[in-house]
Structures are given as C-alpha cells and as structure tokens.
Image (cartoon, rainbow, N blue to C red):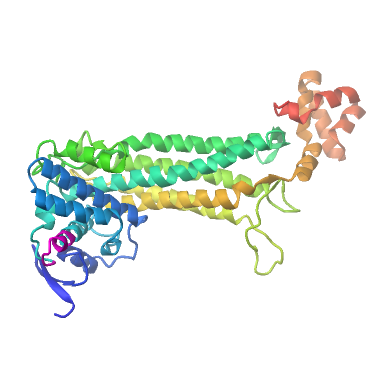
Amino acid sequence: MSGVRIEHDALGDVPVPEDHLWGAQTERSIHNFPIGTARFRFGRVVIRAFGILKKCAALANRELGVLSAEKSDLIVRAAQEVIDGQWDSEFPLVVFQTGSGTQTNMNANEVIANRAIQLAGGVLGSKDPVHPNDDVNRSQSSNDAFPAAMHIAAYEAVDDVLLPAISELALVLRLKSETFDRVAMVGRTHLQDAVPVTLGQVISGWAAQLDFAIDSIRQALPGIAELALGATAVGTGLNAPKDFADLVACKIAEETGKPFISAWNKFAALSAHDAMAALSATLRTLAGALMKIVNDVRWYASGPRAGIGEILIPDNEPGSSIMPGKINPTQSEALTMVAVQVYGNDHAVAFAASQGNFQLNVFKPVILHNLLESVELLADGCRSFMIRCASGIEPNRARIAEHLESSLMLVTALNPHIGYEKAAEIALKAHREGTSLREAALRLGYVSAEDFDRWVDPHAMAGVE
C-alpha cells in the first residue's frame, strides 16, 4: 500500500502513514474517536509533560537496572526532542477518547520509540531496538502515566504562566491604588450612595482579591506535586521495580525545577483526582474575583455622560456599527466571559473528578482539558486586561467631585455630634427639597456653618489625612 507502513498491535496489522512517527494504537485512536476536534488545551504543556515523564522514567529504569544503557540513551534523546517541541505535530489525538488516556500515553510511547529507532538507524515500526510498551512504557501503566502527566502539565502551566499573569495585574492595581489614595469619592452599598471612600481604597480591594486568589492557588499546588507514577495499573506497583516511584519523581523534580514527589497513596492517585478538583476550584474563585473587579470597572466607567462615569478607561476600538463615537468597555466584557467559561469548566472538572469507580477514574482527559483551558483563559485574560485597561485607569476628577458634593450620605459625619435622628432629618429634607446637605442643616438650625464645614470632611470620613 503506497504511502503507508504496516505496524502491528495486539489486535493485528494497522496501516500507518509512512511519514509519521506514531504507531498502530495512535492510528486506531484517530479512526475510533472522531469526536469533536478539540486537542488538549495548552497542548504544548501536555506534550512536554509526556516527554519529561518518559525521559525521567527511562533514566530511572536504567539506574534500577531494568533498562539497558543503550535503550535508555535512545529514549532520553527522543524524549528530549519531544520536550523541546520538535514533534508536536505527531500528537494528533482528541480529548474524547478512553477515559484513562491510554491512547495519548501510547501516542507518546510510539512517537518516542519510533524516533529512537530512527536515531539508531533502524526501520520505523519495527520496534527494534526500542519497543513502545516494553521499553518506553517500562515500569508504567497508562493508569499512572496519564495522571502523572496531568499533574506535571497543570503544575507547570499554573506556576509558569498563570501565577505570573495574576501577579502582574495585582501589581498594576496596587500601584494605581497608591497613586489614587487621596481621591475621595462616593462609596456605594446596595447600589445606593454610602459614606466616602477613596479610589485608592477601592482599587486596593481589587488587588487584595487577586492576592487571595494567588495564595489559594499556591495552597492547592502541593497536591498537584504528588505523582502517580509507580502505581502502575491499580495502585499496587505491579511490574515496577522497588524504588521506581520515588526515583522517577525525584528525576522529574530535577528536570522541571518543581517540587514533585511520589504520591503517598497510589490508590487515591489513580481512582480519584481530588487535587485537580481542588486546583480547579481555586481557579473558579479567581474567576469570581475577576468578575467582581471588571464589573466594578465598567460600572465606574459607565456613560460617559449618562452613567456613573467616575473613572476613565482606555479607548480600544469603536464600539458600535451604527452609533458613531460609541466606545465600549470591551476588556471588561471579555474577562467576564472568561469567568463564565471557567465556572463551566470547573463544574465539568468537579463532576468528572467525582466519577472514580473502584481503582480508576476514567474521566482523566476531560479533567485535564478543562483545567488547562481555565488556566490558559485566565492567564490570557488577566494579561490582556492589565495591558489594555487596568494600566490606563484614571479618575474623572470632575465627575467624582460632582457626585461627592451632592451625596446625602456625607450627613453620617454629623451622627456623633447631633445624633442619628436629626442627621436623618437633614438628609431627607435635602433630598425632598433638592437642596444641599449644608443648606438643609443650616435651615433646620442643627449645626452652624463652621461646624458643618469642620465635621463634614470627605477625606477624614474615608480615613485619610
């Protein structure tokens, strides 16, 4: 048959495109799972994770005397090329496959084995001198290799991509908070006017929400640092040499610079994915914080003339195809949609993680896919919002002053001096008659002009000198 080579697996011969490194089981999966087009989100980190796993397993197997130096060297060289991104196009499988991720694990085994055979000058598909199961997958099962890859990919994506993006946004907000610390403005509770705050205080609350989210995510990472490798098929470690689990985890930690360790209970590592569910929940918390922050931004910026309009945000693009000159808070809108998607992803992860049966959870690929999509979207969304919106936030000082001067809730400063009842009477009189608080207070005779001016100080009320 032109353009193909014949590879063999336990079910028989399989024609495989001759210009690809994958083998029989990958080819079967391509045809057996025509379900959607989604590859693993953030696919590069997943492919890299498998490369790291297979490289370190080969090194551990060699050190433990169950894999020859020659085979180990070939596997390590091929796996390093996978780590470096040389063979990303050789990983074609979709998310919706076997729930253990067996096909993706075998995809990695076949690609690395065939590349090792090439490096040795052998014939693709011959399984000589390197066999995908007996050598690349030695001391492993898909049941422990795939969850290990899940944890490696998740840890690196969160630690290297997401946390820096959140931290950068939090830093921008903290700097804005310091810059606008003395810009007193109307506070709002129940969507109604309240006592004054400063714009700096408002933004400090946003930054604190992000700091909390960062801490929560970091607290979830130790669970992700536990690797299932060494559990093999059901958690007992059958066919893996003694000390393989600890040794391979140590080598993965050295390779990545992350604190990976062997999972203390391998049965839980295969049959439950509570650590992934816990990490996903922290991403949902971050999404909720971002939803609050960006909704505040777009409400404060609403208008420009018929809304609140107390802050100014960058004009990024025209906002309407029919209304000339309209500018919309699109960065906020985009991030709210990210938050909604992350909430949905977390529901999928949580439900999938609840579905372990006996010694295996068979929802592994969808857990990984949804968690990585959340990481990717949140990182991209935070960085885009930081660059195109947060860094350009400025107070609309005239609008802030207008609202502050007309706020009825400044009357709260009079409570300690004339009591709640009289202060309420002043506020209601000013509201009903359309006058200022000062005018209503003087007409009622409850305070002098001098006392009113001394006591009703928005900056003092906000706690700033």
Residue 232's place in the image compared with 439, above or below, is below
Q: Which residues are magenta?
A: 115-124
Please, is residue 434 above or below residue 121 in the view?
above
Q: How many numbered dots are placed on residues in this image?
A: 0
Q: Position of residue 434 (x, y in %)?
A: 86, 40
Q: Residue at x 85, y 26 (%)?
A: 453
Residue 333 in view here: yes
283 sits left or right of 203 in the view: left
Residue 118 painted magenta? yes
In the picture, measured across the screen, residue 331 lies left or right of residue 69, that is right
Q: Pick whichever, 9 or 267, lies toward us.
A: 9
Task: Residue 352 in the image: state x and y as whole percent.
Answer: 31, 48
Q: Between residues 144 and 249, which one lies in front from this camera angle? A: 249
Residue at the spot 33% in from the left edge and 52% down from the top edge: 45
Note whether 301 is above or below 411 in the view shown. Answer: below
Question: Where is the N terminus found, in terms of image quarters?
Answer: bottom left
Instruction: Give the residue displayed 53% in from the left and 37% down from the top.
Output: 209
Asked where in the image residue 412 lies, by quadrant, the reply is top right
Q: Whole-percent x and y of residue 195?
A: 72, 32
- Image x and y of residue 203, in percent: 62, 38
Can you name the residue that lies furthest to the top here? 417
Q: Quadrant of residue 19?
A: bottom left
Quarter containing the C terminus = top right
**Is 107 situated left or right of 457 in this image?**
left
Res 350 seen here: no
